[in-house]
Image (tube, rainbow, N blue to C red):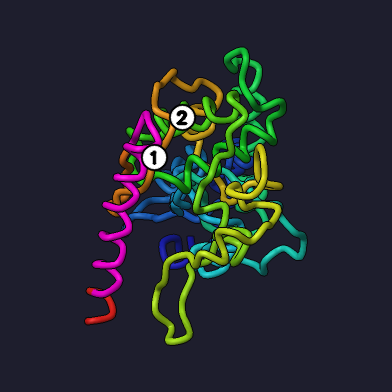
Amino acid sequence: AEGLVNDDQVLKLYARLNNAESQIKAGVYTIPAGASAGMILQQLIDGDVIQLRLTIPEGLTTAQILRRVEAAENLTGPMPEVEYGEGTLLPDTYVFGAGTTRTQFINRMRQAQQDLLDRLWPLRDEGLPVSSPQEAVILASVVEKETGHPEERGMVAGLFTGRLLKGMRLESDPTIIYGISRGEPLYNRQGQRRTLYRSEIDRRTDWNTYQIDGLPKTPICNPGAAAIEAVLHPPETDYVFFVADGKGGHLFAKTYAEHLRNVQVYRQYERDEIARERGN
């Protein structure tokens, strides 16, 4: 109230006389110029505080999320010194008041993820290849990293569900990348973006689903609510294979022969894109 009311004691006295001291809500407020003590008091009672927003996109690793939180200028305080597991933070757009600390923000993301799982897990379909909320998050993280098109999440989840139930491996490229770089982009020695090497596809890690059966050891990112719901309610599909189309989506196939043709299409697109990028 400094600068708006000549003496902050006047506002305190006004609040006391109106029996409003206990109704005042803490926070940072935008007070209109020329506002009277009564107007200011009413705003403090209504709790009309400044609301800030921070969007955490789906599919980021925990390390990537923490870097964003650390860089967010509208949060306060140091980063927490505790470790947060992969897949434990729920991506979303969060609205919060001024003065919110980084620790409070991260803990809110973690609690939101737990609340979501507590709500969705009991409602899951029967006969799924995941036996716990943690396994659901692991599979959802692979679904999240595989597709950049929201309308594909269900199809990818259904395809992966079918593969697991048939005893087939997931064979997901993002799981290879996570085993190599913990989800960071891959670059060659010249600092240019690169594709996976054959030796990396053949290298066994706890995440490489070309080499291991079932699910990766941990989630490979923090999936959003839609991806988690997709693996808990996967649609039935005849598709068994798919490959990226290079544009965020996929080419789906019911037979291996059809899949191999799609792979060649994608590999050529990938080579063309990298050549174009290096040419710039």
Residue 149, how many percent across, how many down?
33, 41
Q: Is residue 71 left or right of residue 78?
A: left
Task: Identify residue type, mark 1.
Answer: Phe
Query: From this viewpoint, which residue is outermost toward the bottom?
Result: 190
Q: CA distance from mark 1 to mark 2?
A: 9 Å
Indicate which disc residue 159 carries: 2
Q: Residue at x 61, y 62 (%)?
A: 182
Query: From this viewpoint, which residue is outermost toward the right?
Result: 82
Query: Is 72 covered by the magenta stretch?
Result: no
Q: Residue at x 57, y 15 (%)?
A: 125
Give neighbour class at mark 1: few <14, some 14-19, many 20+ (Cα, 10 Å): many
Q: Residue at x 44, y 30 (%)?
A: 240
Q: Is residue 16 left or right of residue 96?
A: right
For the residue pair 67 and 187, the one nearer the viewer reads as 187
Indicate which disc residue 242 carries: 1
For the residue pair 228 and 130, the one nearer the viewer reads as 130
Q: Which residues are magenta?
A: 252-275
